[in-house]
Image (tube, rainbow, N blue to C red):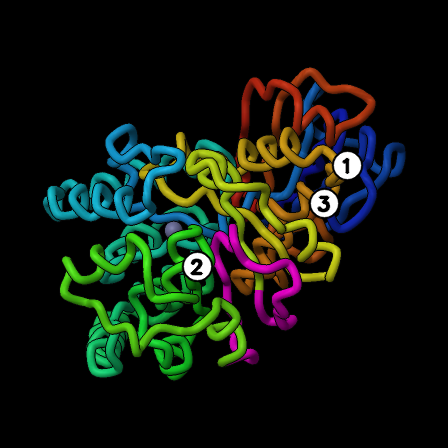
């Protein structure tokens, strides 16, 4: 089998220390070995470049990729006003436009070096494209229902919709009980009956927190207007979903207002969306408290409805600007291995480790003696992505 050895100014394996002029050897679609300088002769030298594992976008909505510039968040506005614009955008899209939007988001992800993503999908519409695409994915079928009966109807549709399309080694189904304001308090537990990982938007806005605590605020008329106002079905605090199904693998997305001492189990991850967080003008994110407690924290871009693009590296750069006390090693891990762990793919990708699949990105940049600083603060001029041992 074909073996190729690559080198660059820096290799950042994530699972080990940075290697200046190290090498990575690929055999077929696997990483055969990663060596420090001097142990192996390279076939190809990328020069002033940094090699990192493929980036992981743990939370996005590819079907909103056409919303760019149309639903921009306004800091300080009631959160349901933004949701209203997103719903109006969705309703304005034809199925053909939605398919094109998904394709656009997918192409953009690949261009940015994303080799694994978690996509929230209404009706599983992104599956046909993701299952054929040169990256790994978890497609989270969105579940909504503020009564048990409505939620079970949504689960039934998910069962019917996913059954003809079994998981592949690269594309798996999950479910997404959408958020506390659209899901009955038993919904997260009920969704555990379906196979796969679960992803939930949680503690995203101050308005959501007010709704859960007091049953008041701008969410009330919003939900009444949609005909889904069921105050008795709401959870009381964001920890309620976390406490049901602690054994199932769960991604809790945003957590902008999640109390820093909220317990998460080893199966549960916190996904933060830094530039979306900034666009809404939320107060500083509590993610450092979760990191300090050993919680698996990873990053997502959310969608073009609230974010300028689907570039995971730009999310890490935003975190670096706003929270300079978090080390570059930790940030890079959040954008790679932690995301792979959250999505259940860490045994095969997420770090440059012998035996894992060769998913990595070569970033050309003016390198310095501190590769993490270069990555998080410098200008990347070009990216090349390898997925399963082939350039994409
Ligand atoms: Zn989202």
Local secondary structure at mark 1 = strand
Nearest-to-viewer mark from 1 and 2: 2
Mark 1 to mark 3 CA distance (whole Å): 22 Å
Q: Nearer the viewer, residue 174 or 219?
A: 219
Q: Residue at x 41, y 81 (%)?
A: 189
Q: Nearer the viewer, residue 1 or 47?
A: 47
Q: Main secondary structure of the magenta part?
A: loop
Which residue in the protein does label 1 denote? 23
Q: Are marks 1 and 3 in contact (CB under 8 Å)?
A: no
Mark 1 to mark 2 CA distance (whole Å): 49 Å
Q: Which residue is drawn at 88% across and 38% down?
A: 39
Q: Quadrant of residue 198?
A: bottom left
The correct choice, above or below, for 237 with respect to 14 in the image is below
Q: Which residue is drawn at 56% across and 61% down?
A: 342
* Boundaries of the magenta span: 245-268
Q: Position of residue 204 (x, y in %)?
A: 44, 53
Q: Position of residue 154 (x, y in %)?
A: 23, 73
The correct choice, above or below, for 370 with respect to 300 in the image is above
Asked whether residue 242 is in view, the answer is yes
Which residue in the protein does label 3 denote? 330
Asked whether residue 1 is in view, the answer is no
Local secondary structure at mark 3 = helix
Earlier sequence position, callout 2 versus callout 3: 2
Local secondary structure at mark 2 = helix
Nearest-to-viewer mark from 2 and 3: 2
Q: Mark on residue 248?
A: none
Which residue in the protein does label 2 denote? 209
Q: Position of residue 298 (x, y in %)?
A: 58, 51
Residue 1 colored in magenta in the image: no
């Amino acid at each position: 089998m074909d073996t190729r050895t690559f080198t660059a100014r820096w290799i950042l394996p994530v699972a080990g220390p940075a290697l200046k002029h190290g090498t990575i050897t690929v055999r077929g679609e696997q990483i055969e070995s990663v060596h420090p300088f001097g142990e192996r002769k390279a076939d190809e030298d990328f020069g002033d470049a940094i090699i990192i594992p493929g980036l992981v976008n743990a939370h996005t909505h590819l079907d909103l990729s056409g919303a760019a510039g149309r639903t921009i968040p306004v800091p300080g506005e009631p959160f349901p006003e933004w949701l209203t614009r997103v719903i109006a955008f969705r309703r304005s899209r034809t199925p053909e436009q939605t398919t094109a939007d998904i394709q656009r988001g997918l192409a953009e992800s690949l261009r940015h070096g994303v080799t694994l993503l978690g996509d929230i999908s209404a009706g599983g519409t992104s599956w046909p494209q993701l299952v054929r695409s040169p990256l790994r994915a978890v497609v989270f079928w969105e579940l909504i229902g503020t009564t048990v009966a409505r939620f079970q109807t949504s689960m039934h549709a998910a069962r019917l919709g996913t059954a003809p399309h079994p998981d592949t080694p690269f594309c798996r189904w999950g479910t997404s009980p959408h958020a506390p304001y659209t899901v009955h308090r038993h919904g997260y537990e009920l969704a555990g009956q379906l196979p796969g990982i679960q992803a939930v938007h949680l503690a995203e806005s101050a308005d959501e927190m007010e709704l859960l605590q007091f049953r008041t605020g701008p969410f009330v008329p919003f939900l009444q207007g949609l005909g889904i106002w069921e105050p008795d079905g709401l959870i009381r605090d964001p920890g309620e979903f976390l406490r049901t199904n602690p054994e199932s693998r769960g991604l809790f997305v945003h957590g902008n207002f999640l109390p820093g001492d909220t317990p998460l189990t080893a199966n549960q991850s916190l996904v933060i969306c830094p530039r979306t967080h900034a666009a809404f003008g939320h107060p500083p994110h509590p993610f450092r408290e979760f990191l300090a407690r050993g919680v698996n924290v990873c990053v997502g871009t959310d969608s073009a409805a609230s974010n300028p693009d689907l570039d995971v590296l730009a999310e890490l750069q935003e975190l670096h600007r706003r929270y300079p006390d978090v080390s570059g090693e930790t940030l890079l891990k959040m954008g790679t291995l932690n995301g792979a762990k959250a999505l259940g793919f860490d045994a095969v990708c997420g770090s440059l480790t012998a035996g894992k699949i060769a998913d990595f990105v070569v970033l050309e940049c003016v390198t310095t003696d501190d590769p993490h600083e270069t990555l998080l603060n410098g200008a990347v001029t070009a990216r090349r992505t390898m997925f399963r041992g082939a350039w994409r």
